[in-house]
Image (cartoon, rainbow, N blue to C red):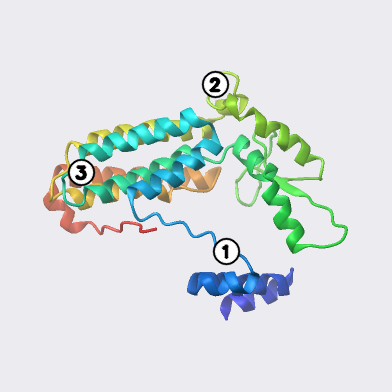
Amino acid sequence: ESVQQAIRLNGTFVEGNLRTLTLGRLAAHDPQALAAEINDKPELVSLDSVDEVLANRTALLNRYQNETYAEDYRRFVERIRAQVNGIAGGEEFARQVALTLAKLMTYKDEYEVARLYSDPKFMARIREQFSGDFKLTLNLAPPILPGRDKATGRPRKREFGPWILSALRLLAKMKRLRGTAFDIFGYFPERRMERRLISDYRALITETVGQITVETLPIAIELAAAARDIGGYGPVKDASVTRYLEVVGNLRAALHNPPQAQAIELKVTQL
């Protein structure tokens, strides 16, 4: 009721937002009922096993970059999985690694934003929600343009008209430049940080695997999942990375001194 009241007070697209909220609640409570309501099949993805995560995330990474990028991810996860094979709870550790590494490797840079907006499904969803003649504008904050929002400190967003979709389609095709010397966006500090997080995470997991015992496994699982709390962009992402590094420091200390684990509240994210 509080969320509904907030939607009404906001006064923008009230009926549509209320309907969306209701459909979301129905999707969480009974996906099959929602499917019947909208005459469609729900896209239910199970991520309960390492194999299921690998299948789903490898396909995602292939779309994100290419087959080589996806295969590099798969090989790393399979190597870690083999190292914990036979350890009770080792599969859950490998599953958390698979989920978290995929998240880090699919950081939302300019090429990915362009790919998502260029996907035909995007415009199809828009046309499902709005009829008649409408004008589409996007609020974006390209890093190549200066300026920050005075209130939040975040990169300032600018409004772009329908023409930007053509530019985004072109940019999406340039994703092969990601991470190369010709990637002009890759030189920005946030992109450097995102790539560094991937390599640091791989090193962290490689180090952690050698310290897994029955006693330390819960800590190792939490350590493997910690990076999934990283999110946002600009100052928001910087703050989340800072928190992540603090958590990693505490968990690594506990990993080296298991008795300290009693004082740490472990919250493994389940998907």
Precedes in sequence: disc 1 or disc 2: 1
Where residue 253 is drawn, which disc sits there? 3
Rendered location of residue 191, percent (x, y): 53, 32
Viewer-nearest of discs 3 and 1 = 1
In the rendered image, which residue does mark 2 sit on?
180
In the rendered image, which residue does mark 1 sit on?
41
Q: Amino acid at mark 2?
A: Thr
Rendered location of residue 116, percent (x, y): 64, 44
Where residue 193 is drawn, which disc sits there? none
Query: Where on the picture, by quarter, is residue 129?
Result: bottom right
Precedes in sequence: disc 3 or disc 1: 1
Q: Is residue 152 above or below residue 44?
A: above
Query: Is residue 103 among what the camera can see?
Result: no
Distance from Cα at disc 3 to Cα at disc 1? 47 Å
Name the residue at 58% across, 69% down.
35
Name the residue at 33% across, 43% down.
97
Q: Is residue 13 above or below residue 133?
A: below
Name the residue at 69% across, 50% down.
122
Q: Residues within 10 Å of mark 1 (few under 14, many from 20)?
A: few
Q: Secondary structure at mark 2?
A: loop
Q: Amino acid at mark 3?
A: Ala
**Which quadrant is the N terminus positioned in?**
bottom right
Query: Is residue 150 among what the camera can see?
Result: yes
**Which quadrant is the C terminus positioned in?**
bottom left
Distance from Cα at disc 2 to Cα at disc 3? 36 Å
